[in-house]
Image: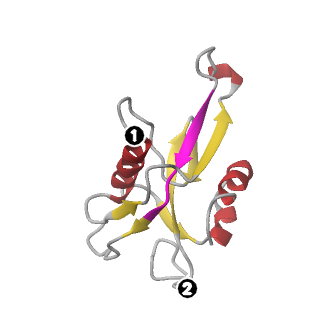
Amino acid sequence: NDRTSLNRKLDSNLMLLVKQKIGNQELWLLPQVEWQPGETLRSTAERAMATFLGDHIQAKVLGNAPYGIYKYKFPRAIRTENNVGAKVFFFKAFLQSSDLSQAELKADYLWVTKKELGDYLKSEYLKKVNRFLLD
């Protein structure tokens, strides 16, 4: 039951979680990167996958529109009049190459089922993403 392996729970969809630094906390999250001006949301999603999967793993982002969104407010101490919070847009992606023997993911990572997400995600984040994740 090695959660860093794709060779588990073969009858279930697995989702990639990565450990990311948000503020001063290290959190398990679905992969995300900051949007860059001039990028489409899909391009940002593709860059997120490349950032975490590296060169040896290929994933295909499906569609041009996000299939989920998570909005949150920043802590009062760092809010500004023009910047009170953030929106995270989620895209569905499928792994196209599963030969991970040469791959080195660029972060702490796990492959988990929807039921296992609760072991890693904060409750408010989990509640929001569970609305659009498929089993």
Asked if residue 88 lies in the magenta stretch, the reply is yes
Residue 83: give x, y in percent of width and height: 59, 21
Judge depth for marks 1 and 2 and give the one in front: 1
Q: In the rendered structure, which segment of residues is drawn in magenta?
A: 85-93
Q: How is the image coloured?
A: secondary structure
Asked if residue 120 lies in the magenta stretch, the reply is no
Picture quarter containing residue 67? Answer: bottom right
Q: Residues at badges 1 and 2 in contact (C-beta under 8 Å)?
A: no
Q: Is residue 37 above or below residue 47?
A: above
Q: Is residue 25 above or below residue 19?
A: above
Asked whether residue 122 is in view, the answer is: no
Mark 1 sits on what residue? 40
At label 1, the amino acid type is Thr
The count of marks equals 2
The residue sitting at 32% across, 63% down in the picture is: 104
Depth order, front residue of 84/63: 63
Residue 108: give x, y in percent of width and height: 46, 58
The residue sitting at 69% across, 63% down in the picture is: 118
Q: Viewed as shown, does residue 61 lie left or right of 75?
A: left
Under circle 1, the secondary element is loop
Mark 2 sits on what residue? 11
Residue 90: give x, y in percent of width and height: 53, 51
Depth order, front residue of 75/94: 94
Residue 125: give x, y in percent of width and height: 68, 50
Q: Return the residue found at the far bottom.
A: 11
Depth order, front residue of 109/24: 109
Q: Quadrant of the C terminus?
A: bottom right
Between the residue at mark 1 and the residue at mark 2, the CA separation in whole angstroms equals: 34 Å
Picture quarter containing residue 60? Answer: bottom left
Picture quarter containing residue 103? Answer: bottom left
